[in-house]
Amino acid sequence: MTVRKGGRPRHRPQRSCVVCRRKMDKRCLTRIVSRAQGLLIDPGGKAEGRGAYLCRQSACWESAARGTALARSLSVKLGEADRQRLWQGRPET
């Protein structure tokens, strides 16, 4: 944890995984963005569009590709191309 002048700890943004609902630092999660062209895996977390977060567990990525939690949080209907993109982008853990 980084400490600022004055002894106060630096603020670290918290987000939760849309599948397992675990809350953790924003930098430990991967942002998925809904765009007109389809889903975009945004490792930098700065792309425009409605976003949702997934943790780095491959089980969460597989569940997001198969289920409805990610589609519900992004307010979109996932197509087959979107599901393939998620399946290919999942972490190897």
Image (tube, helix red, strand yellow):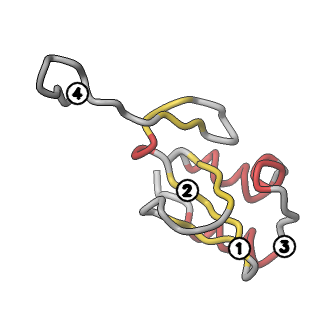
- Residue 93 drawn at (x, y percent): 46, 50
Q: Which of marks 3 and 1 is nearer the N terminus?
A: 1
Q: How far apart are marks 4 and 2 (CA)?
A: 23 Å
Q: Alpha carbon of mark 1 to alpha carbon of mark 4: how far?
A: 34 Å
Against 53, residue 83 (above or below) is below
In the visual, does 47 lie left or right of 67?
A: left
Give the spatial CA distance, label 3 vs label 2: 18 Å
Q: Which mark is residue 1?
A: 4
Q: Do the residues labelled 4 and 3 touch (CB within 8 Å)?
A: no
Question: Label 2 belongs to which residue?
Answer: 31
Q: Bin the neighbour count of mark 4 within 10 Å (Cα to Cα): few under 14, some 14-19, many 20 and up.
A: few
**In front here: 87 or 70?**
70
Q: Residue 35 carries which label?
A: 1
Within-10-Å neighbours for mark 3: few <14, some 14–19, many 20+: few
| Residue type (three-letter) at the residue carrying disc 1 | Arg
Q: Disc 4 to disc 3, how far (Cα)?
A: 40 Å
